[in-house]
Amino acid sequence: KLPRGSVIFLWQMFFDSLFHAYMLIKTYRKDAVNMDMRETVRWRVGVGDVDRAGFIRPSALALKLASSGARRNREEGASKDRIWAELKAVWMFRRIRLCQLEHIRLGDELAGMGSGRTVCGNEYALRGELYKNGRLAARADMIMMPVVLGSRKRLLCRDIEPFFNTRPLNEVSPPEPLPAEKGLIYDRRRHISMGDCDTQARHFAFHSYVGLVCRETGFGDLEHPLIPLLQIDYIKEIAPGGTLDLGVLAGAEGYFIAGKHLSGKLCFRASCRYTGG
């Protein structure tokens, strides 16, 4: 007969496995076919990646997921360094949708995986995944586009395809844009500092939006929450020194948040929800 403590531990392990499977199926139930995912990088979670309690910060999670996916582009010929050298262009994000299934802590060893690219009109979709101890810990689907930095001219996929040494696999289902939220009250104001910006493109970095969204929707008030869903639509970039007016709406399905420039033009929309806090 097992000791009571051992029985409780086994039940906890069982329910943890069920929760992991449930979240995976609920969030990615369309992925019935195995995709061509390849390991692109190994990460060790460092001090700069975590909060005071030693859990990975949302912005660091997004950055590692995006890097895991984008490194597949580099392996297949269209690295950011190459398109910059030949076209003076950079990759910019249009949308990111991520899901966290496991806690990631200081010192954890992660395997980063990247998908082949999917051509979506004149944009590309990619997937990045992080595995911890052989289990899927987080996943992000991203839509990116190449843009000439100086003029902000959007390039077409046909301008970038010659850089690749493989054909597009077209396996990633690109996340749909978030709907506009009517009646949102923009009653918060935030200033954008140089420290939050991408040094090459000189705009608010894509992963800094993740940190902003989580801070404004109470992530830090919870005790070690997971992020089963966070989506950001990047609409009009903002430069260092700029100011955003923010509106936040809490509902049964989580939070909706949007930011707009002082001119009134929309900068981004986001939706998120947390569990376990």
Image: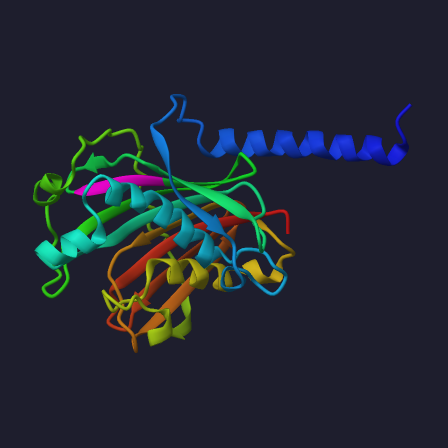
Which residue is at 54% across, 34% downward?
Answer: 134
Q: Quadrant of residue 203?
A: bottom left
Q: How many marks?
A: 0
Residue 46 is at least partly visible in this image: yes
* Residue 72 sits above or below residue 166 on the image: below
* Residue 2 sits above or below residue 223 on the image: above
Where is residue 85 shown, x and y percent of the image?
Answer: 12, 57
Q: Decide which of 19, 54 is in the foreground and name it.
A: 54
Q: Quadrant of the N terminus?
A: top right
* Residue 106 sits above or below residue 164 on the image: below
Q: Decide which of 125, 251 is in the foreground and name it.
A: 125
User: Of helix, strand and loop, which mostly describes the magenta segment?
Assistant: strand
Q: Quadrant of residue 73?
A: top left
* Residue 181 sits above or below residue 20 on the image: below
Can residue 124 be found in the magenta stretch?
yes
Where is residue 205 shown, x and y percent of the image?
Answer: 33, 62
Which residue is at 38% across, 58% downward?
Answer: 207
On screen, residue 271 versus residue 239, left or right, reads right
Can residue 78 be found in the magenta stretch?
no
Q: Quadrant of residue 266?
A: bottom left
On screen, residue 96 versus residue 168, left or right, reads right
On screen, residue 33 versus residue 235, left or right, reads right
Where is residue 276 shown, x and y percent of the image?
Answer: 63, 47
Which residue is at 26% across, 71% downward?
Answer: 239
* Way the structure is coloured: rainbow
Which residue is at 47% across, 34% downward?
Answer: 27
Question: What range is drawn magenta here?
Answer: 123-127
Where is residue 226 shown, x and y percent of the image?
Answer: 57, 48
On screen, residue 189 versus residue 214, left or right, reads left
Residue 177 is at least partly visible in this image: no
